Amino acid sequence: MRLSRRSSLIIACVSVLFAFAWGISTISKGKPAKEIPVGPAPTPTPTPLPGPADSKFVLNEFHRSEVRDGKKMWEIFGTQGQLVSEQNLVRVSNPHVILYKDKGDVVDIKATSADVKLDGSAIGKATLSGNVIVSYNSANTLTTEELVYDRASGRVTSEQRVRVSGDLIEVEGDELRGNLNEKEFTLLKNVRSTLKPKKKL
């Protein structure tokens, strides 16, 4: 069969294209795939550890005192004392604070717990909590649930309900402002007083 010139040209072009495609396929199969270099795995960023907690030193049967010129100024007892050195603070369980004032006056303070801020080796400020009882010369008694005492100024303050009881009168109210050195106490809100009958000898 004799092909026309146009048909021969079409067959020749198809043959060339087929040969070209077959050659590319052969080269692709014979040549190994190029490896893509993989770098080292990224180092994970370390999670920062929490900072060290305040170092604490615990003493059972805690006791401290200050003596000046041969005279005892104060002392504090507790079933346990926990020193938090970074805060210069002592947490005392069942504290019993005794303040020795001029002319032989003695202030006795008891509570369930106390945070005592130190001023050097002395008491700076004490925050007493839980069934706080303050007695002055064993005659007048102050009771509340929280009391802040500043030793340098002698000030005592409380935002809680406070009861002050003496031989002849009992006063109760909210928010105490007082001074142990001057023996002055003021209740700011909801104050009421009760006179007590004089005891017969």
Image (cartoon, rainbow, N blue to C red):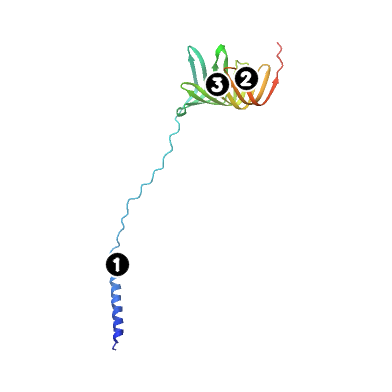
Q: Where is residue 63 in the image (x, y as percent from the top left)?
A: 50, 20
Of callouts 1 and 2, which one flags the residue occurring earlier in the amino acid sequence?
A: 1
Mark 1 Cα shell of 10 Å, populated few (<14), some (14-19), many (≥20): few
For the residues carrying marks 3 and 2, which lies nearer the camera in this image? 2
Helix, strand or loop for disc 1: helix
Of callouts 3 and 1, which one flags the residue occurring earlier in the amino acid sequence?
A: 1
Which residue carries the number 1 mark?
28
Q: Is residue 18 left or right of residue 119?
A: left
Which residue carries the number 3 mark?
96
Residue in the image at 68% along x and 18% along y = 169
- Real-space CA distance between mark 1 and mark 2, rounded to the nearest whole angstrom: 102 Å
Q: Position of residue 71 (x, y in %)?
A: 50, 12
* Rendered view: 26 above or below 98: below
Helix, strand or loop for disc 2: strand
Three-letter amino acid code of the residue under disc 1: Ser
Q: In this view, does 187 lie to the left or right of 62?
A: right
Residue in the image at 51% along x and 14% along y = 72
Three-letter amino acid code of the residue under disc 2: Thr
Q: Position of residue 49 (x, y in %)?
A: 42, 39
The residue lying toward the viewer, choosing from 168 and 58, is 168
Mark 3 Cα shell of 10 Å, populated few (<14), some (14-19), many (≥20): many
Dots 3 and 1: beta carbons under 8 Å? Answer: no
Dots 3 and 2: beta carbons under 8 Å? Answer: no
Three-letter amino acid code of the residue under disc 3: His
Residue in the image at 28% along x and 75% along y = 19
- Real-space CA distance between mark 3 and mark 2, rounded to the nearest whole angstrom: 15 Å
Q: Quadrant of residue 1?
A: bottom left
Which residue carries the number 2 mark?
141
